[in-house]
Image (cartoon, rainbow, N blue to C red):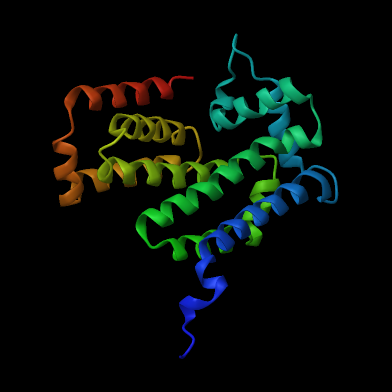
Amino acid sequence: MKTRVTDFWLYRWRYLIGYTAIIVAIGIVLVIASLYVPGALRQGEIDAALASGRLSTKSIDPHMVVDLPYHILQRLSFLTFGVTTLSIKLPSIVLGVLTSLGIFLLIRTWFRRNVAVLTTILATTCTQFLFLVQDGTPNIMFSFLTIWTLFAATYVTRKKTFSTLWKVLTGVLMAAALYTPLGIYLVVAVLTTMFFHPHIRHIVTHFARPRLVIAIALGIVSIVP
């Protein structure tokens, strides 16, 4: 009898192998970003750390409103671990890991799992992504917010379970995007799709009004510094 591809051990365990490869790739990124990146901090990283260090609940400099969510995370990192190279880069590392997870979940929602595995591996090991993950500046925020906003918005239109959660999460992420440079374009793109795409517009018009109001209200509250 001729041997089929499905008879091979690698084929039966292909998804487990793929998931393991993703975890290993992310682990390598963490190790490189945390311990083995040569050279000192860039001037941009120093400026971001200084801005986060000046962050206070009593007074917020208008210039600090830009990328405020990232500066809050970096400030929390300083309060927890002190000001070190690792604590400066830690928010980017965490957001990078979450972005990798978001890429996998988003692609798996749109396409088959094998496509999601391959795409995530390629994305997490490319030079640009590795740089963003180890860079202690807010540059990773736009990628993080874009991926998770698209994922949450996709689940708003496809999932009936926890529908309120996905609506609220979409509103909060869109509000957070307004703090980042170019984030307004992401918000405009999502809203334009919502109003002009026939299928999505039909779904939105049938949302439960109280839940939609809650999502919008939380999104507006998230805009306020």
Residue drawn at point x = 42 percent, y = 56 percent: 107
Q: Relative to residue 206, is residue 132 depicted above or below? A: below
Q: Relative to residue 176, is residue 102 depicted above or below? A: below
Q: Relative to residue 174, is residue 214 depicted above or below? A: above
Front in this rendered view, residue 45 or 201? 201
Q: Is residue 91 found left or right of 108 in the rendered image? A: right
Point out the residue furthest to the right here.
39
Front in this rendered view, residue 213 or 112? 112
Residue 19 visible here? yes
Front in this rendered view, residue 177 or 36? 36
Point out the residue furthest to the top here.
58
Q: Is residue 30 found left or right of 150 in the rendered image? A: right
Q: Is residue 207 found left or right of 72 in the rendered image? A: left
Using the rendered view, name the quadrant where residue 167 is placed: top left
Q: Which quadrant does the N terminus fall into?
A: bottom left
Residue drawn at point x = 17 percent, y = 28 percent: 208
Q: Is residue 139 found left or right of 154 in the rendered image? A: right
The x, y position of residue 139, in whole percent, is 60, 44
Residue 139 visible here? no
